[in-house]
Amino acid sequence: MNILDTLFFLVKNMIPYMIPLTIVALGGMFSERSGIVNIALEGIMVFGASFGIFYIYFLPNLFPPQITLLIALVIALISGMVFSLLHAYASINLKANQTISGTALNLFALAFHDFMARLITPNAVEGVRFENAFRIVKVPLLGDIPLIGDLLFKDVYITTYLGIVILIVASFVLYKTRFGLRLRACGEHPQAADSVGIKVNRMRYAGVLISGALAGLGGLVLVVPSTVEYTGTVSGYGFLALAVLIFGQWKPTKIFLAAAFFGLMQVIANSSGLSFFTALGINKYFYQIVPFLTTLIVLTFTSSKSAAPKAAGEPYDPGKR
Amino acid sequence: MKAFLAKPTVQKIVAALLSIFFGLIFGFLILLVASLLREKASYPFDAFYTIFTGGLRYTGLRGFGIILRFISPILLTGLSVGFAFKTGLFNIGASGQFVAGGFTAAYIAIKWTFIPLEYLWIVALLGAVLVGGIVGMISGLLKAYRNVNEVISSIMLNYIAMITVSNLISVIKDANNPSRTQPPLARIPTLGLDKIFGSNTADMGIFIAIAVALLIYVVLEKTTFGYELKACGYNRNAARYAGINDRLGITLSMTIAGALSGLGGALVYISAITKVFDSLLVLAPEGFDGISVALLGMSNPLGIIFSASFIAILKGAGPSLARSGFNDEVVKIMTAVIIYASAFSLIFREKLGALINRKGTKS
Amino acid sequence: MIDVIELRNITKIFPGIIANDDITLKVRQGEIHALLGENGAGKSTLMSVLFGLYRPEKGSIFINGQEAHIANPNDANRYGIGMVHQHFKLVHNFTVLENVVLGVETVHNGVLSMAEARKKVVELSKRYNLFVEPDHLISDISVGMQQRVEILKMLYRENNILIFDEPTAVLTPQEIDELMKIMKELISEGKTILFITHKLNEIKAVADRVSILRKGRLIDTVDVATTSKESLSEMMVGRKVMLEVEKKLAEPKEVILEVKNMSIKSKHHGKNAVHNVSFKVRRGEILCIAGIEGNGQTDLVYGLTGLSKLSSGEIHYKSVNLADKSIRYRSISGIAHIPEDRHKHGLVLDYNLAENLILQTYFTPKFQNKGFLDFKKIYTNADQVIQKYDIRSGNGSRSITRSMSGGNQQKAIVGRELETNPDLLIAVQPTRGLDVGAIEYIHKTLIDQRDQGKAVILVSLELNEVMSVSDRILVMYEGEIVGQADPAKISQQELGLYMSGSKREEVIE
Amino acid sequence: APKEEEPTYELALVTDIGTIDDKSFNQGAWEGVKQYAEENDITYQYYQPAEATTAAYVEAIGQAVDGGAKVVVTPGYMFAPAILEAQDLYPEVKFVLLDADPHDENYTEFRIEDNVYSIYYAEEQSGFLAGYAAVIDGYTSLGFMGGMAVPAVVRFGHGFVQGAEAAAVELNVDVTVKYEYLNSFAPDDAHKTKALAWYSEGVEAIFVAAGGAGLSVMAAADTLDTAKVIGVDVDQSNLSDSVITSAMKGLTTSVYEALVDYYADEFKGGVIETLDVTKDGVGLPEDFSRFTTFNQAKYDEIYAKLVNGTIVVKKDAAKVMDLVLTKVVITLIGSE
Ligand SMILES: Nc1ncnc2c1ncn2[C@@H]1O[C@H](COP(=O)(O)OP(=O)(O)OP(=O)(O)O)[C@@H](O)[C@H]1O
Ligand SMILES: Nc1ncnc2c1ncn2[C@@H]1O[C@H](COP(=O)(O)OP(=O)(O)OP(=O)(O)O)[C@@H](O)[C@H]1O
Ligand SMILES: [Mg+2]
Ligand SMILES: [Mg+2]
């Protein structure tokens, strides 16, 4: 494979990493921008993916594959949202330490998947097999465009497009709408928001619920292309999304770039078998740590100004100045 | 009685007990639901009893030994996370520090045969403390000098440590099995606990862990050093203003947190019980258990001794659940609910406080 | 005359304290009504009740004779009430415009349309001479500007009852003058103003009537014109207060601190925040660094105390060059620092009072033994300091500092720093936001220090304070010292010329 | 519905790391237990140790025994030290130990008692057959992905390479094999990417001996028209159309047989046995429809050669690179 082919391979294959990371990190962004730190992203992903997969498991052929996938995605989204209510309630109404409910949700989701899977699978096991008929071999017409067609319109899942739509919508909502303005105010200075009549708690609920919806969705988006059996894990992608969120400085475009960066590094990490890389003669170990090491190094040189929402992580106390 | 209940410590303990109560109730409901839906899972009451006793109803003394052995690592990772919390940092990197420390201990206990065998385990523990500390220190330095969020750096370091250890296995690999390390030559002394519990499980590690918890308590609450570290955590600028080296403080906090997790790793990998490293790329769960333990123990070292024991008991019950037709996820669900319920403790304490005050004004 | 606002029998209770105790207050249409009271008297609380931030336990509010139900700021807004809070409620990384419209945005189909808002804001700022740039970020503009944004917020909402909670505490003299003008202009348009301040001059200058609160109760409402400052302060504190600072002539002794060609890089722009500054301080004098906020005073102090690194220059203190010495070294060798920002630097808000009172001394043998803190001594020390400096708080030495009032937090810092028995005291805005009683106390303490042969560097934005407390004045402008003056000989006007950069002279010592 | 008195389970399996649907030895063994138990209406249960330590394994075995087990099946080499202990602790209970024989952690004490039946499988023969079939069928660019370099997986890999060599010599073609251990037995995007990378560089078929990780390799193959997968342990053709064959080992059958023996009072106590082609312990599935040239006849021919010893597959090479090969070039990614 020549360099161009290698490059094409890398770019094409970073998509399955970067799309779910983008979606979930954007979810985290809405939550943190409203003032609630959400370390439950991992658990919500698992939870959302579970219910999406359960649907596919029970009703694989009720509708054409793409419709089935869309319904499953909606189910993942809703279940993620419902699940995140628990985090919202604890962090907002109970003013609890936001790590507590986040950690609890992470634990719960993993165990709950196993519990449910055992109830529904005939052998009472944790893995749920599903018919994966969702790959789009080629999008008509668009797939014929040179390069772009190969990159974006062949061998794809609708989730790729969904991810891009979500990115655009998220940026728009955050920066161009009243909701976005108010949400950001609540994450920076809730007392200020309160003093101009914004219902801080309501906005924070909205932020957490959006994060739940996107994380739930992102869970399924991650799982569907990579396997035909879901065992109730998203292998740490929720935490990686958290890292992408911080790396992306809580801003949609930068999150997207951070996810792309991380996705690219992940592909490189797993492409050590390509002749281009074997020819370099570098030990596989270095490929394996590439995503994590480069992230650390990049952060070392880009973190001097943190753009973290000022009030994120603190329960809103109207009396505090 | 009133004065007793008014004490914050007492209120915290009562709140924690209530959380556990809620968790158990919820767990029981889960058992009931499962028993109604699944043919095999037909003994919810038995299962509940099993969980409640940590499986000791079946496992007896030997099970107790296993529970003791479960306590030590998560007690230390719990301390690691809790210590960082107290100094204003979130150490989500306990997992990486844990394996780094554990591997170092194993390496020393296998390779450093030039040290007399009876001291080797001590050197191995110290090595683990050192290397765990270094991993923590990286996060600390990045935070202190480059403003890198410690959450993200420690997530990255978790993976780096895991991958590194997986690749280093060849250095101390088992001749018959290239994917595993050899068992260590030197182990932590059992102090006769193996005789008491009838199996090679509990060892001196549990005492080391508890002693370290007490030490951390004293350091945090009673010493100038703890005062400095907490000041850095609560308000870095004020600490600087007061002449405390805030960067050093943050670095030291993460270093100590890392060292604690590292020691936790050593307590597993050179313990009486043989756990060897394999090359599987899985993050060490003990690190994440540490977060639960720290939260449930409210980051207080004494509370952490309690919460680590409690979670170890639940963990110990896992295998015995099969006897009643259940699996260990029930226990995990319960743990999650207990931690979630502990989020209510603030509200609960307020309510309790109000109740006491109301009674006070009446009389 | 109509009472535009009537607060009837307002009682507001916080855990352990009655912040407002059965207060009845009437405000007339078109007046500037001042509220006066010691720190913690309940002024902010009362206004927060009126603005809908707090629900009172008892009492009712009447607007224009009609009972009003104000449960949140939105309700208040509906009644035309707006408030400039003591601590500004501005989102630092939003633009001026975004802050102004927040909460009352114009939208088309949910999408923000800022063009109309911008037009209105520009118009308003022209009409009231509130010059602000709508697209600047709050974090990039001065405190005075920020206050204008707060005022714009009210005007944008077309409020006609305006509450100003200690608006002048953070302003320069010029800004205060301008604010006074603006307030008068607003009144002339028929608006009503409630004005909280600790400064009697200001009340004298603009207010029509003043209500005095003490310990949660309304003492009286009186006409400003017919009441003297002395009797106002007496009503407020409950005893006679010395309003004029009394002091002997200074007797400067040997030089304790000599700064030579000090420069410090700015964190915000490429230039030097402090540029080639040289001066001397002697024992037995109070040297005041005057200047408009943002002219390098803060950085100068950071340089002296070690919070910032010098880019060049030397600091000779008791014949040691401090330039590369640590903060700890400086504090041990007798330099105390009352910081400008008490929340950022002065206190660990999550420590209790006793723990904060040892922030500079916890490591000394007085409070520790072999690395262990001696809590008995720590609490005894706290009780002494609390008593000596009259620090009031809910739980004495065990109060979490976060819950204490700003005034008392300030007293705690002052007490702590003085207890180290420093040779050089660097006090930055030590009386910001304090009531007259507390100010009197702090001024007296500064002069006492001087009279004991200690050196004091006072950094203040407040001309009154500068003129009355200091023995010598250095004026800073754009990072340089542009003038030296003797307070006895210079007029406030002339000082103002130096501060605004219109006049400068070489200062050679 | 809830019942009252405590249950007992006559047949028990204690799982190694992973659980009974690991697409690997746990699952294979469990299916044997289950099949026998259900056919004969015997109670059965599996137990998951709390962690991967000998003490936890012994403890779980204790639970099984205490819970009424008469036969305990323990899949995986990790059980060797645990069974060394358990065979003495519970002399009246029978143990079926797969992939190992009882010994201590340091490989100094090897001892099997009458209540233990140890089964090894000749994975190298199974892998050989798969490699042979693939090359005969015209695949010349192959890949091997092992879950982890544990003895059984290593045998699969080494056998695979030797099978490819045998066929390459026979056909006089040059064959390349990419060879890597994933260090994972679970599905993961990473494995999918890895497989895609291989396929995109011309690898035609990947033999994946890595439990659930195989699912991700199949997911990769499914996105490409010509990419093929060779399954492991059991016939995995139902998992994906890309699976051309599977290198099977008779986990399920052997466990089933062991139970049959036990109930017939013929338990092979004290026996350490390697199930190979001579005992029908390993092989490929009978369905050759996904091959073009390789077929039943070819299979029978090569199988016979293995049975009669004309071909001996090496299983004791320390490293794959130590194998002497003439027509096969191995690219080892990472280390072994
Ligand atoms: N959110 C709160 N929670 C508890 N107590 C409070 C709260 N806000 C105010 N208080 C109490 O009410 C009293 C009055 O406070 P308030 O802020 O009204 O004082 P103030 O007159 O505005 O003082 P200052 O001059 O310092 O601004 C304080 O002494 C304080 O103890
Ligand atoms: N979280 C809190 N809990 C309890 N009381 C509080 C809290 N926050 C503020 N207070 C009370 O509110 C009152 C006013 O506090 P605030 O922060 O307004 O002081 P400040 O205006 O900065 O002080 P000053 O006006 O004296 O300079 C204080 O008396 C304080 O006791
Ligand atoms: Mg106030
Ligand atoms: Mg105040």
Image (cartoon, helix red, strand yellow):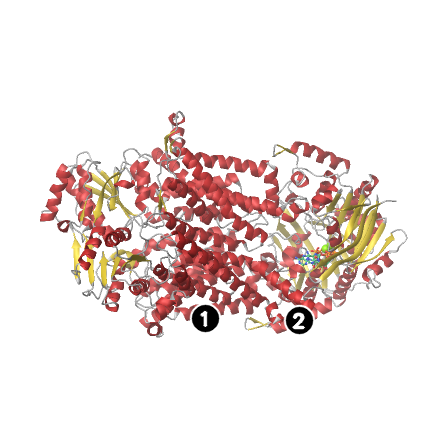
- C-alpha span from label 2 to label 1: 33 Å
User: Element type at marker 1?
Assistant: helix
Q: Is residue C466 above or below residue A67?
A: below
Instruction: Judge by depth and name the residue closer to the eye, B276 or B317.
Output: B317
Q: Can you see residue A276?
A: no
Which residue type carries mark 2? Asn
Look at the numbered discs 2 and 1 and tell me whether their residues touch, using CB distance below 8 Å.
no
Q: Is mark 1 within 8 Å of ligand 2?
A: no
Location of residue D112 in the rendering, given as x and y in whole percent from the top left corner: 19, 64
Report the image quarter containing ligand 2: bottom right
Q: Disc 1 marks which residue?
A: B211
Rate crowding at label 2 as few (under 14), some (14 to 19) or many (20 or more) other CA atoms within 10 Å.
Answer: some
Q: Is residue A240 above or below residue D49?
A: above
Q: Disc 2 marks which residue?
A: C381
- Check the picture and name the quadrant holding the N terminus of chain D: bottom left
User: Element type at marker 2?
Assistant: helix
The reply, left or right, for residue B151 in relation to residue C231 is left
Instruction: Judge by depth and name the residue closer to the eye, B155 or C108.
Output: C108
The reply, left or right, for residue C492 in relation to residue C52 is right
Residue at 85 percent across and 50 percent down: it is C209
Image quadrant assignment for residue C339: bottom right
